[in-house]
Image (spheres, grey):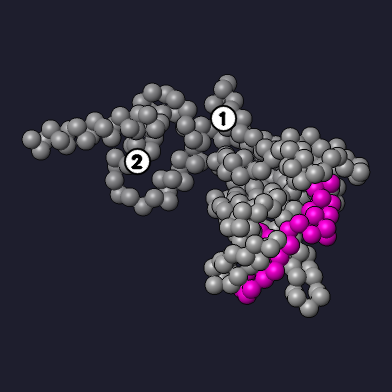
Amino acid sequence: MPAVTIDGIEVNVEPEATILDAAKKAGIWIPTLCYSPAVPNLAACRLCMVELDFGDGGQQLVTACNYPVRRDLIVSVSSERAVSARRGVMKLLLARSPESEELKELAQQMGVEGTPYPKVTESQRNCILCGLCVSVCEEVIGCSAIGYAGRGAERVVAAPFRLASEDCIACGACAAICPVGTIQVRIHEGTGEAEISPFKSRAKLLICEECGKRMVTEPVGKQVLDRVKIDWEEFRKRARLCPECRRKRAAAALGLAAAKSM
């Protein structure tokens, strides 16, 4: 197993583990924003940069979240160069998302107070362009309903043509994975719809056939039934029930089975 010496602490990790994995094992904190175990490592935010020491006088800044450990490494998280690089990235992020409470809290942990750069004033100003929502929509959910649009300071995550996407199933995965809370699931009681904000995509909510409670959206329910190849009508009936009614039906079915066996 390769050995990683990180800020003087040596740990052994499995081959192809990352520097971030080694840091966690050593109990050393490295700030991250675009990292999530749910999707492939993107290294989009550049906030996890550390310095590699090659032992021959050469050093290099690399992103810890996706740098694979294939041999013994010497890594510095606390070097002046690494700390300066991470703080520089954070100042740019604060200019992009000046109102994000999550970002301001992380900046404080990193010792960054404010930003010298002009602040973005777009409607999506709290988006840090980490790409987690785009990745989870495409690679996990399989919809590709959102992507990048624009360039430079005008770059945003949006649905095609910045209109409500017909491909969005309003599952909420993008909102769940967003590290700064920019994406929200809004429930419209009047129309019985779920909206993914700020993308404006909406979908009707399923109604429990037993108690009338609102559940997941209709496209999500349809995908569940389409993907699960179970030729069992009871499963399809339970998929149209809320969790509470589903438990009641399952308990009733177990009771009936027990009574028949007596």
Residue closer to the observer: 133 or 115: 115
**Which of the numbered marks, if any, corresponds to residue 236?**
2
**Which of the numbered marks, if any, corresponds to residue 224?**
none
Provide residue 120's location: percent of width, then percent of height.
Answer: 86, 41
Provide residue 165's location: percent of width, then percent of height.
Answer: 64, 43
Q: Is residue 260 visible?
A: yes
Q: Residue at x 49, y 41 (%)?
A: 220
Q: Residue at x 42, y 49 (%)?
A: 226
**Boundaries of the magenta span:** 63-91
Residue closer to the observer: 15 or 250: 15
Residue type, numbered disc 2: Arg
Q: Is residue 161 visible?
A: no
**Please, is residue 117 above or below residue 73 in the view?**
above
163 is within the stretch colored magenta: no
**Which of the numbered marks, if any, corresponds to residue 193?**
1
Q: What element does badge 1 sit on?
A: strand
- Distance from label 2 to label 1 (Cα)? 22 Å
Residue type, numbered disc 1: Glu
Provide residue 193's location: percent of width, then percent of height.
Answer: 56, 30
